[in-house]
Amino acid sequence: MRYFIEFSYKGTKYSGWQRQNNAISVQQLLDEALSLILRETIESVGSSRTDTGVHAEQQYAHFDTANAVKDSGLLTYRLNSLLPADIAVHRIFEVEETAHSRFDASYRRYEYRIVRRKNPFLSGESHIFHKPLDIARMNSAAALLLTHKNFESFSKIHTQVNNFLCDITLAEWFENDGILIFSIKSNRFLRGMVRALVGTLLEVGTGKKSIEDFEKIILAQDRSKAGPQAPPEGLFLVEVGYPE
């Protein structure tokens, strides 16, 4: 039987979502907890891969089990008792055998969060950026993302993907309670894509690059033309959408 699990985590201490050979990942801890409670080997499949230090306010995974989960609320409670404080399970529900947390997702939305001065309460959950920024210019450049499909310039190199095409439907900067946020929504994301976009858009905001330069970078399909990756601690996976 197949189940979806909805959960969140603060990624500071982890090597990302996906299991690694020589580092602790969120997937490893979740699978170990599920395996212990269900008394069988569980291998979950996540909806999105987040890198080292990246957080998730909403993440999904699916897992298969030989026995029906009789009380999903109790399983949720027991998982939260086993998992560390920075990983929280919200709900578990049965799905069709063919349902897939990654391939069935219709969109993902990420936020990148920036503070302008040191804030001890947001340490590890935001990027400190002191230089003045032209938010209007950054939004004009971000709007160009909705008019293009190939984002190879913002992908990590040597990744095993069939193509670099993404359908971005939202890309905007806004301020909320003193935090500068970049929100971006797409049917898929390339490895390192959001952080590379943020790093390049910050160069637009400081005047290092023009809006025209930004579009040339998109068209170049060359990672060396784009700016540096923004640090991981400001990045959050905030929403994963599925068809009704």
Image (spheres, grey):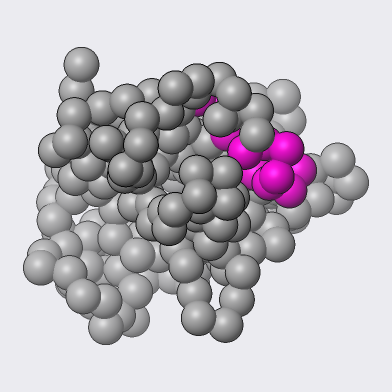
Residue 112 located left or right of residue 96: right
In the picture, residue 79 is in which quadrant? top right
Q: Residue furthest right?
A: 120
The answer to which of 30 and 174 lies nearer the viewer is 30
Q: How many circles with numbers are drawn on the protein?
A: 0
Identified at 68% across, 46% down, the residue is: 83
Q: Is residue 88 magenta?
A: yes
**With respect to residue 46, does 70 lie above or below?**
above
Identified at 27% across, 36% down, the residue is: 1
Residue 173 visible? The answer is no
Residue 79 visible? The answer is yes
Residue 147 located left or right of residue 230: left
Q: Residue furthest top?
A: 244
Residue 128 x/y as whole percent:
73, 54
Residue 25 x/y as whole percent:
56, 64
Residue 19 located left or right of residue 181: left
The answer to which of 207 and 80 lies nearer the viewer is 80
Residue 81 x/y as whole percent:
73, 38
The answer to which of 57 and 209 lies nearer the viewer is 57
Q: Is residue 41 magenta?
A: no
Identified at 65% across, 34% down, the residue is: 78
In the picture, residue 190 is in which quadrant? bottom left
**With respect to residue 127, does 143 lie above or below?**
above
Residue 143 x/y as whole percent:
29, 38
Q: Which residues are magenta?
A: 79-91
The answer to which of 66 and 233 lies nearer the viewer is 66
Location of the C terminus by quadrant is top left
Identified at 22% across, 60% down, the residue is: 151
